[in-house]
Amino acid sequence: MVNQLIDELTPSAPDFQLRDACDQLVGLFALNISPRDISLCFQINIMTENPDMLVQLVSSHGMLAIMEVLEGKCSRDVLMKLLHIINLVSRFILNTGWFESNVAG
C-alpha cells in the first residue's frame, strides 16, 4: 500500500492525485485523524504503534519522492500535506530514536 502511494508522488502528477496520495499516507500514520483534531503527540504515539508503515515509507524512498514533488510546482494544499508528512516522520524519528535503532546501528 505504501509503495503504491509513493509511486503516485511524482512532480508530473495532477494535484488531485497528489492530494489523495498524501491523505492516504497521513491516514496510514494517523488513522485518518486530521491534524487539526488531534495533538501531534498522539499522532506520534500512533506512529510508534505502526512502525511498519514508517519502514515502508523509508525503504521505498518515500522521502525522496516527497522532496522531488516539493521541487516541482504543486498547489499550496499539496505543499502543506507533504510538509505535514515530513513533520510526522521527522518527529517520530527524533522522539523515538527509530533511526539509530533501525538504520544507523
Image: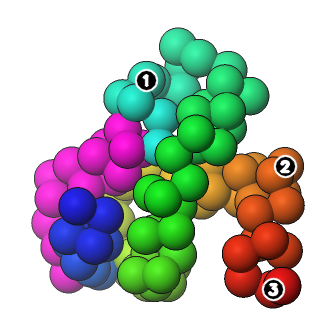
User: Of callouts 3 and 2, which one flags the residue occurring earlier in the amino acid sequence?
Assistant: 2
State the image coordinates of residue 75 (x, y, percent, origin top left). 34, 56
Amino acid carrying mark 3 in the image: Ala
Q: Label 2 belongs to which residue?
A: 95
Label 2, label 1: how many angstroms apart (C-alpha)? 20 Å
As drawn, the label of residue 1 is none
Q: Which residues are magenta?
A: 12-28
Front: mark 2 or 1 = 2
State the image coordinates of residue 74 (x, y, percent, origin top left). 34, 65
Residue 42 placement, left or right of 96: left
Q: Label 1 belongs to which residue?
A: 33
Say which of 52 and 63 sits in front.
52
Tell me the residue at 72%/82% (across/down).
103
Tell me the residue at 71%/75% (across/down).
102
Label 3, label 2: how many angstroms apart (C-alpha)? 16 Å
Q: Tag 1, which secondary structure?
A: loop
Asked if the magenta segment contains residue 46, the reply would be no
Q: Tag 3, which secondary structure?
A: helix
Tell me the residue at 58%/39% (across/down).
49
State the image coordinates of residue 31 (x, y, percent, origin top left). 40, 30
Amino acid carrying mark 2 in the image: Asn
Amino acid carrying mark 1 in the image: Ile
Q: Tag 2, which secondary structure?
A: helix
Magenta span: predominant SS is: helix
Mark 3 closeness class: few <14, some 14–19, many ≥20 residues within 10 Å: few
CB within 8 Å, label 3 to label 2: no
Q: Quadrant of residue 2?
A: bottom left
